[in-house]
Image (cartoon, rainbow, N blue to C red):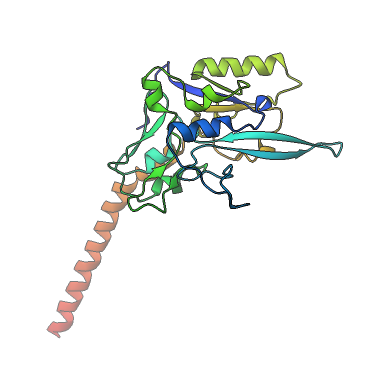
Amino acid sequence: MATKLSPDSVGMLIDITRCIGCRGCQTACKNWNDMPATPTSFTNTWTNPPVMTGTNLTVVNFNIIEKADGSVMWRSVKEACFHCNEPACESACFVHAYVKTEWGPVVYDPTICVGCRYCMLACPFQIPKYEWDKVFPEVKKCHLCGERLAMGLEPACATACPTDSITFGKRTDLLKEAKARIAANPDKYVNHIYGENEVGGTSVMYISDVPFKDLGFKTDVTTRGIPQYTWDVLKWTPHIAIGWTAVLTALYVYTKRRSENDDGH
């Protein structure tokens, strides 16, 4: 059953038009979570990581957008967990190591995780990452700085952004702010808030002046929560189990009687 979100549940609004690609959010995330620097796959030097890993919970990547007149422009996108309102990772985790809290973040309990990695398979955005190099590995992803929120602080990435590209607050307020920005600048923004409805809605949302598909966002995802599809299938499991039990029992009885009759002849 999906967690009922509090009316005061929080999240983040990321305005791609304001992002300058400084990667301050990326550095702040690493500092707060005490995660080591990792080499990039391009230069093998200890610089900015290009992809999310067990030690890179958020990354900023650059996108080259070709315009209709043949010119190009750059757009930077902060990538991390969307903190879905109905998380597929939570639905897939049979020990409940991932939990959607009523106040917004999807949090993880490593003490009960069995390392099955079903969460990685279930996530429509391929966010959770496994610590392949650890003796006792965990499945890592952004947890929206839940411990900072408990202390009345904002997520580390939001506090580090110099251009206010990342806005933290109540999800309801963030939606109002996003709609207000789009309405005030209809020629600037794409009329779409990514995360308002995708996969049932997410706590981290985006607005942009470039179509989201051109920025690598998944635009073919459902607006229905992923776990709802899971339960559509699982609700038939007891009936299927009972049906198969009856069929196998009948086959067993039939086979046994036939064998007895053959032995009798």
Quadrant of the image containing the N terminus: top left
Residue 220 in view of the camera: yes
Q: Residue 195: x and y, percent?
A: 55, 29
> Residue drawn at (36%, 45%), measured in percent from left and top?
234
Which residue is painted at 60% across and 28% down in the image? 206
Q: Nearest the camera: 229 or 239? A: 229
Compared to 154, does 242 lie above or below? below
Identify which residue, 36 or 237, lies in the foreground. 36
Residue 134's spot in the image, x, y percent? 37, 52
In the rendered image, the residue lying farthest to the left is 264
Question: On the picture, is 8 further left or further right than 65?
Answer: left
260, above or below 22, in the image: below
Q: In the image as oriented, which residue stretches furthest toward the right? A: 69
Does residue 231 appear in this view?
no
> Can you name the residue that lies furthest to the front here?
45
Q: Is residue 24 left or right of residue 242?
A: right
Tell me: residue 263, above or below residue 56.
Answer: below
Q: Residue at x 61, y 22 (%)?
A: 162
Judging depth in this view, the residue of 221 and 73 nearest the camera is 73
Q: Residue 188: x percent and y percent?
A: 74, 22
Q: Residue at x 16, y 79 (%)?
A: 261
